[in-house]
Image (cartoon, rainbow, N blue to C red):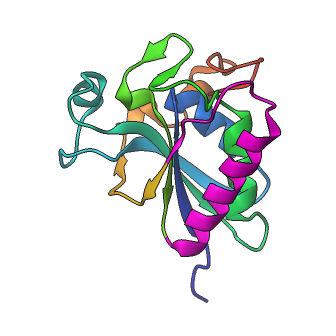
Amino acid sequence: MANKNKFAVFGAGCFWGVESSFRAVEGVVDVAVGYAGGDLAKPSYRQVCTGKTGHAEVVQVEYDPARVTFAQLVDVFWQIHDPTTLNRQGPDFGTQYRSVIFYSDEDERKAAEESKRRLDESGQLGRPVVTQIVPAAEFYRGEEYHQRYYERMGIAPTCGIHGRAD
């Protein structure tokens, strides 16, 4: 039987907390941290941290679409970071910490755009949403020491807004 899982890529600041948050979502099969949206093939963490590669710190979420939809993942994305801050999450700043949704097809683009529009129009954040919604880019898996970082270190996620990871 063929694997029916799908993948979604989100950037919301510090990827350790984003990974931890998505791992807790029912229907998410796996999450990997890495980099996307830049110009350099196979960038390293050190290279991305310079802000010169154009990549964002992102997570690639593998999910079972029979159990959770892309739109539901977008809803989680809005809750785990501040999408109103340009190139910044908490103390982390630079384009590598930008808020971004990478879409794979027209349905995902529409779902992300509609969700962003509803969030903006709700006024609940008090400022405009600056999240980029862009076509999927090559995902480069981050170094193994970044994968499941909080879990391996035995610590609770510490980056986030209102006690939530970002």
- Please say if 165 is above or below 32: above
The magenta segment is 105-132
- Please say if 138 is above or below 49: below
Q: Residue at x 71, y 53 (%)?
A: 115
- Please say if 73 is above or below 53: below
Q: Is residue 24 among the parts visible in the rendering?
A: no
Residues 131 and 149: in front is: 131
Q: Residue at x 48, y 26 (%)?
A: 86
In which image quadrant can residue 68 be found?
bottom right
Q: Is residue 115 magenta?
A: yes
Left or right of residue 31: residue 118: right
Left or right of residue 23: residue 131: left
Magenta stretch, main secondary structure class: helix
Q: Does the magenta stretch include residue 131?
A: yes
Q: Which residue is drawn at 44% across and 28% down?
A: 97
Give the quarter of the figure containing the C terminus: top right
Where does the image place residue 144, in percent across and percent down from the top left?
39, 37
Give the quarter of the figure containing the N terminus: bottom right
Where does the image place residue 102, in percent across and percent down from the top left?
48, 55
In this view, which residue lies farthest toward the top?
Answer: 91
